[in-house]
Amino acid sequence: MATTNDLKNGMTLSIDGQLWNVVEFQHVKPGKGGAFVRTKLKNVMSGKVIDRTFNAGVKVDVANVDKREMQYLYREGDDFVFMDTQDFDQPRIPAATVGTAAGYLLEEQTVTVAFNEGTALYVELPAAVELTVSQTDPGLQGDRSTGGTKPATLETGAQIQVPLFITSGERIRVDTRTGDYLGRA
């Protein structure tokens, strides 16, 4: 247990049986009346963001979130198999938990997996990854290196938009948060 005065960005709280990350908080002391803490909370499972106000000094339940470095091994059915780099444990994480990160996962890639009471909450990828373009249409005569984009399929199966000058077989950098093309690798 902690009080609202102890809140920090990134802290995970357990409120009404759900886990919420503190995105931002602000301690407010108005001229009259009691102080309060205005927070923006993001649901760990659904990603929903809400605003919530607490009276100053109110006790809140802090969730124990264990973040571990893991290596992605392979996909088996609807599950992804990871290996803990410390104790070599191999938990199976459902595809729903991995979410959109699956489009940027390569075998033997190291990621951060967050657990709460033995349950995987989410998979956190590096900000950018290097992937190979497995298929994209060639640029047409008259296309320029600046300007338009075209669809490309990556080696993981993810579809992104790339500039017209990118060809099949090239290695590119991709932003894992937005799925945007960042440049050649």
Image (cartoon, helix red, strand yellow):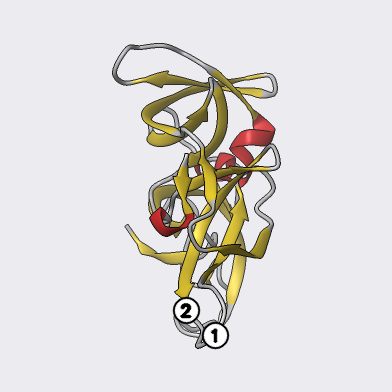
Image point (65%, 53%), residue name: 47
- According to the picture, the residue beneath numbered tag 1 turns out to be 32
Q: Residues within 10 Å of mark 1 (few under 14, many from 20)?
A: few
Residue 63 is at least partly visible in this image: yes
Give the image location of residue 78, x and y in percent. Answer: 69, 23
Image quadrant assignment for residue 73 = top left
Image point (55%, 65%), residue name: 39
Q: Nearer the viewer, mark 1 or mark 2?
A: 1
Residue 8 is left or right of residue 56, and the answer is left
Give the image location of residue 115, x and y in percent. Answer: 50, 29
Q: Is residue 130 above or below residue 156?
A: below
Of the numbered discs in the image, which one, if any, rests on residue 29? 2
Residue toward you, 6 or 114: 6
Residue toward you, 9 or 133: 9
Which secondary structure lies at badge 2? loop
Residue toward you, 163 or 65: 65
The amino acid marked with disc number 2 is Lys
Q: Residues within 10 Å of mark 2 (few under 14, many from 20)?
A: few
